[in-house]
Image (cartoon, rainbow, N blue to C red):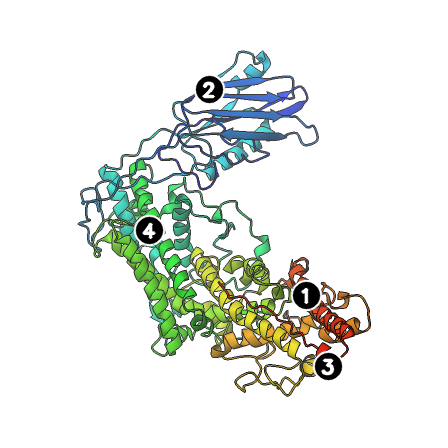
Amino acid sequence: MGKNNRLGQASKVSEHFKMYKDGKTWVFAGLAMLSLGIGLANPAKDVHADENTPPVTNAASVNSSADSKEEVSAVSGTSSEADVNSSADPATKTAVSSEATSSVSESATVSSATEKSSASSSTAPSATAQSSASNFAAPSATVQSSAASNSVATVSDAVSSGTANKKADANVTNLVNPTSTELNNTKSEAESTYLATGQAQVVTATKATVPIDTTSQSYKNGYAQASYDIVEKKGLASTANNVGVAGSITLVPGGYTTLRNLYGLGKVYEAGRIANGVDTSKDVHLDISPETVGNSVLLPYPQVHVDISKITKTDIPYGIDISDPKAWWVDSVDVDNNFLGFGGTDNAPDHLDDVNYQAGYQAYIKLWAKAQDAYFEALGAGLKDNLALYANSIAYNKDAVSGSNMPADVLGIASNAFNSALASNDKKNIWTIYQNAATAAMKTVQDVNSPNYVAGDANSNAVKAISDTLWQLNQAFAAYIPMFQPAIQSYMEKAILGNPVSLGGQNDWDVQFLNDGTTFADITYTIMNGYAYQDLGALATQIGDVPFASIFFSQYITNIYTSIRNTIERADYIAGIDGENDYLHDLLQNKTAFDPSTSLTNLKTTIVEGKDLLSDHNGGKLALFTDNHDAKDTTKLAHDGFYMTTATYLNNSTENIKQAAFQAAISGKTQDVSQFLLTKTNTMVKNLNSAGKSQSATVVLDNKGNEYSDYSDNLTDTNALIKSVYDAEYQAVQKAMADYKADPTTAGKKSYKIVYTQYSDN
């Protein structure tokens, strides 16, 4: 099924896989009931659910190009058809292609939570404890295969006796409620056994029909356990010191405590988002292992540089299988089976086989995830309302180019944080934006008319777990954003505002901001070259209890990165377009807005010679991307820098574009703007990558110096602008000449003003 489809109740599903020998050729045939994933060679395709499908008879057939044929029929409460054609290929021994479509009736009972919790933050939930609600919403479960109830399968008598005997001799493996991983592993093992022994293998996967009772005490206990795990900082919700060992012993002053496993907790959050049907297409689709993210107790930072291209890509974010209860657990320690049997109260792993308990646990995680989505939505709105404030809080670093390292000043983490007592007023105001976002999200949680409503008062675990998480996220962002945003913001300003493609307008900005590092992990390990520790050097691998490498892959960081990236783009776009408009105005007047005594004709030469002494409107130095700049000058840099980008590429010739149009018009030549049009080859620059190698300004290189993105095909809008400027001057001169020819007197001498229309940003 599609990754965002949900089923309210689990249903019985059977799947069979068989291998047999027909003549001299080995054949693998999948016997499919209800369109469950077929075959080992090819994975099953997504099957999308269709609500309110009336009960009909279900039929499935399997055809093989070998001499033997098998037919499977099934009676079900849903409609489903599957046609599978399998052909034996002597070269490959096994080849299976399959197509499956299915429509499944979806049924879920959703009840509102009405009772308040009597559990406190210090009391562990138990089988006798009162739950925070009487009727909780049943969790949605996305099953990796089609689902239906009461399916019965029979094998037709038309099967040849030889094949039937092989089936009787087959080794049968029965799986009940397997996860996608367990099913795939079993299929792989069956294939290996078959190839080694020649014995037919049959794998049967059954998802038993187990209705969820949302009124049961077990369901309520699972719901309560999820919030308890978060409030009590269990497992993935634990915290640690960023510059200490074991989260408690501070080796240097200035320690700062955050969530220890922002990556792991983010995966639980992502499981809730997937189940809630949120669009996760832009999230991290990588199969991350502990070794990849440096998740080590003794050496938490072994992976400073990760080759992200070698990490396995996944269809679902992080390869999460939300049909597996383990994907939802905040605390995965099985206390009934820990060292010497000690550990106190039980938790989710102790109830692995209790579907009601797990359903309750998942129901809370879904609500918890929705509240966090509300937080990020409110944060995005708050940042949008404070564009200049936010953008002008980060200094510009001219060395932030592709292939460079992202600095991680661990020792300065506390003093540089937004919520530090030493923070500037601008940083404190930004901290207020984050706090306001958490407050706004909590209002929806406590609003009975909101889809985010969670039953319970402010001190109940159900509500407190959400407020605690939002506080912890703000605490983490306050520390990590000042550490990592400067490199990201500086890179984007230099690479994107310096790209001639950006002269084409908003859409041409968008394509770059959305593509140059879709996630924080992408831009860190694909465009940038990982990160480097300032001050600590090699000792950084010995200090701190937070594995920084894992932070880059966290869904939380991916979300905040997207919000910040959008904010930077909007702030820079508004300032940058003003700079472009100023240049177009100056072009018509042949003087600079920065220094009226300098003609526009000489502007490009002045900059190329390194005499970047032109003054801005306020008499200050012109801000260029080749220099470092203070945080307060970020939007000034966007304006001035984009002014110079326009000057550089609108006059991409030894002759001024306006003068060229003028000379062509008075000489009677046809309009020819070709020498000014931009291409990939005539926009070569240096200093856009750490190696200092020459590259087209329309091209982005990765950290290995290879071409990551080529935007030269997006120069159409920019070249249209260049042509319009040339044509405007040419036509104005022609019109003036025609008027004078018609009336060669003083009255016939007319001046035509070329106007460049400026549109407001909305």
Structural distance between the alpha carbons of marks 2 and 3: 96 Å
Tell me the kind of residue under disc 1.
Ser
Tag in front: 2 or 1 = 1
Residue 664: give x, y in percent of width and height. Answer: 79, 71
Tag 1: Cα neighbours inside 10 Å, few (<14), some, or many (≥20)?
some
Q: Residue at x 67, y 61 (%)?
A: 715
Q: Identify the mark nearer the N-term, 2 or 3.
A: 2
* Dot 2 and dot 1 residues touching (CB under 8 Å): no
Residues at marks 2 and 4, CA–CA distance in whole angstroms: 40 Å
Drawn side of residue 162 relative to residue 73, left or right: right
Q: Which residue is labeled 3 in the image?
A: 746
Residue that mark 2 sits on: 74
Marks 2 and 3: CB-CB under 8 Å?
no
- The type of residue carrying mark 2 is Ala
Task: Say above or below: 270 vs 213.
Answer: below
**Towards the viewer: 513 or 92:** 513
Which residue lies under the disc numbered 4? 368
Tag 1 and tag 3, C-beta contact below 8 Å? no
Question: Badge 1 is on which residue?
Answer: 724
Across and down, in percent, residue 268 comes to: 39, 50
Counting residues from the N terminus, which is met first, the one under dot 4 or under dot 3? 4
Q: In this view, does 105 lie to the left or right of 590?
A: left
Mark seen at residue 748? none
Q: In this view, does 621 lie above or below 201?
A: below
